[in-house]
Amino acid sequence: MKKIFESFKQNLPQLSTIFFVVFFVLFPLLFGGYMFYDQEQIGFYYPQSFFHDAQVARGNLPQWNNAYFGGISVGLDQFVSSYYPVNVLLFKFFSFFTAHHLSIFISILASCLLVYWFGKMNGFSKNAALVVSLSYLSALTFEWLDIGTTAGHAFLVLPVLCIALFKIDREEHKWLFTFVGAVGLAVGFLAGFIQIVFYACAVAGFYAIYLDWHRKAKGLRRFKCIFFLALIGIVGVILGGWQIWPSVFLVSESVRTATYAMQQADIPGPNELLTLFLPDYIRLPFLGGGAAGFYTGALSFFIILLSLFFWIRKGTERFFALAYLLILGLAFRLPVFSFLNDHIPPFSHFGGQFRWMVMGAFPLAFLAGFGYQKLVDTSVSQSLSEKQKNRFLKYSGIALLTLIAGVVFFNIGVWYVLKRSDLQEKLLSLYLERRTLQFTIEHYLQVLRVALEEFQNIFSLLNYKMVVPLLLLVFAYLLLWFYLRKKFRVTLFEKLGLVLIVCNLLFVYSAQFGAALLPQRILDINNPPPLAQKVKEHNDPNSYRIAGFLISDSLFWKASSKRIFTPEENTKIYLDLLVNNTNVFYSIQRLDGMEPYATLRHNQILSTVIFPPGLNIFDPKSPAITADELNKLMNTSVFRQAVNIEEKVKDFILKLPLLSAYNVKFIYSLIPLQHPSLKHIPLSNVSVVGIPLYLYENMDYLPRVYFAKNSEFFTGNPNELILKMIENTDFKNKTFIECATCEKMNDNTLGNVEIVSYENGFVKLKTYSEHGGYLVFGESFNPGWKAQVDGQHTPIYNANYIFQAIFVPKGEHQVEFKFSNKNLWNLKKLFTKK
């Protein structure tokens, strides 16, 4: 213990710096009354934490969330961290905002401290290890720090695994560090962004191979690190099984099919490479850019270049340089590397493979610390010949001047094009050549002008967020120039270098506070927006659902493509339109929503048939229906393009019977709808950024639980069932039940249903029917649901493609439906053939 205290005391300045920087970055969230801002934060991550907080307050560990997609398993969701003890305690004792942000703070601080420790273990000085830690935080970017409570817990997995493997390789308390590694991995499984956790495991696997390769041992001892990493994985899965295991069972039910990764394989463009030397908030309007794993800060950037040119020859630094190249190949989907993404589970079930770059932050930060260590070691830095120094300073100086000149000329070019409408028309005609236009040419001209104006604002030399990063590059270059020219002593360079790195990091994060953070008061949960207020007048949220028609697309066509909105305006839009899952804040349940873990069946009937994106329309006459299983995220093979908005509206109206079957009582839209079964509900002239908002009550919607009057049993190709459901115009009188052994009941089954209790994942009913019949339950049928009639288990069947149905005999009965996630004790079922 005394040795630990002495070590802590000796490293206190560096540890304090790490704490201060992390605290500074997250201070506005922890104590300033701010929250993260962007569409995913407001519409997905914060609603998940709000839901988690509400469930924990009731003494529950949430397993089912019925707020979107007709209900979805929390185990399939994976963004709530329901079984992570630290989060459970935080949400138990703090408000959801505070708990959400404290969880991020704890995990980010732990990640940076672990990285510092790893640097020290590799022989770096205290300041060099500090450079590794700060560069790691810089390379993660604000965009990834705000990915709910899952981000930081994923970031600590790779450092803790590398620490464990390092200690195991050197026979230093190997069993203790095996357990440490397993606990870190379990934290990732329980609370991390699962895709990043698996990517971390892959990089750690390469590190284990590297360590074993260089060990002078024979026989099985040569594979010691690989063996212990496998052991860490097994124990980690056991410890984190409460969260990871439901995913193992349910992944086959989700949209993450074998083709998912290839569908989401957008190859990044050169815009992402801007982040090598400019902060990730420098992005191209409508084109994106900015990514984790690139920007380590101005000085770290030059130091890494210097290391690559002169010092990386062998050892751990060479491994991390090669690991970074490997990550680049995987992220940019180079031909050989794409095989892993496309064909090897679990990676073949992940989209957005550019997220590999998040793992690139760790090796890049290590290289920054390595280069800094070499620079302050005078025996190494002075060993560079004058020719080598001159060559580095010359080419890096030319590159820096080229970057600055490029920004200047780019500003002039954009300014000139904005002044010339004829040039804008020529640029647009070149871009739109041989493309089918869905709107008038004036619409596209307006979009182009908005993009050019935003380009001008971002890259303007009057924009301090652009100028300061350029100046930081200049300062970093000059600092290196004076030091390599022996104008500075090593102690002065060391101090100035650390100050520059810290200031660089603090500036990059603080520069984003205005755009990335907003006051929490904007999200006033106790004062719902007009749409939510009107819907909430119907007091029982378990009796109906809502759905939006073409909200995101029509908002883009009518507003966001014509001007850039401020964060405050965007937040108001998200809340006014209940974008994604903001309905969770107001205890409103919806049929659509944002959910990357939606089931295949949800995706097939909802995202493919009822709500196809843009001006796409499901084509029931497409020949692909008989040949394609519709197991893609975007089933474009069965889409056709609508001629105009009117045709899209007409198609949506034809889907009203399906919406009725799925309990949709309220439909809202930025486009007016007309149908005899839709009753317009005035919203007191409510508009969103000047666009009228329309709310309609669907008079034909079906209740959440009811006895089917007529049941049509179905077996066979699910695509055929989809076609049958589209043709059905009255689900009150015909319910489709998937059952191969069920016998047809008498027509016009009559019955009464009383809902005794209705909670997330549990419903208790009293039923009465004269002849018995099939009871339809309007929650998604995921594996894990069980039903009982008078305490006796009864089989559940798919009803109307995504809902549930059970047979209830005649007379009075007590009926229960209960959901429970698959857990580790269901291991044997994983290997049981269906």
Image: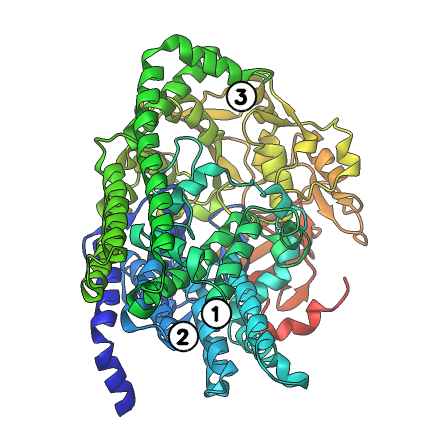
Please name the residue shown 64% across and 41% down the image: 604
Quarter of the image containing the C terminus? bottom right
Discs 3/2, front = 2
Q: Which residue is mark 3?
A: 676
Please name the residue shown 44% across and 56% down the image: 308
The mark total stands at: 3
Query: CA separation, marks 1 and 3?
Result: 71 Å
Q: Three-letter amino acid code at disc 3?
A: Pro
Given contact means CB atoms under 8 Å apart, are the residues at marks 1 and 2 in contact? yes
Question: Which dot marks residue 122?
Answer: 2
Residue 31: percent from left, percent from top: 19, 57
Q: Which residue is mark 1?
A: 316
Residue 740: percent from left, percent from top: 80, 52
* Residue situated furthest bottom in the rendering: 2
Could you tell me if residue 571 is visible in this image?
A: yes
- Label whose residue precedes the other's in the sequence (3 or 2): 2
Please name the residue shown 70% across and 60% down the image: 795
Q: Three-letter amino acid code at disc 2?
A: Asn
**Nearest the eye: 722 or 433:** 433
In the displayed structure, would residue 196 be above or below residue 577?
A: below
Discs 1/3, front = 1
Res. 251 image quadrant = bottom right
| Helix, strand or loop at mark 2 | loop
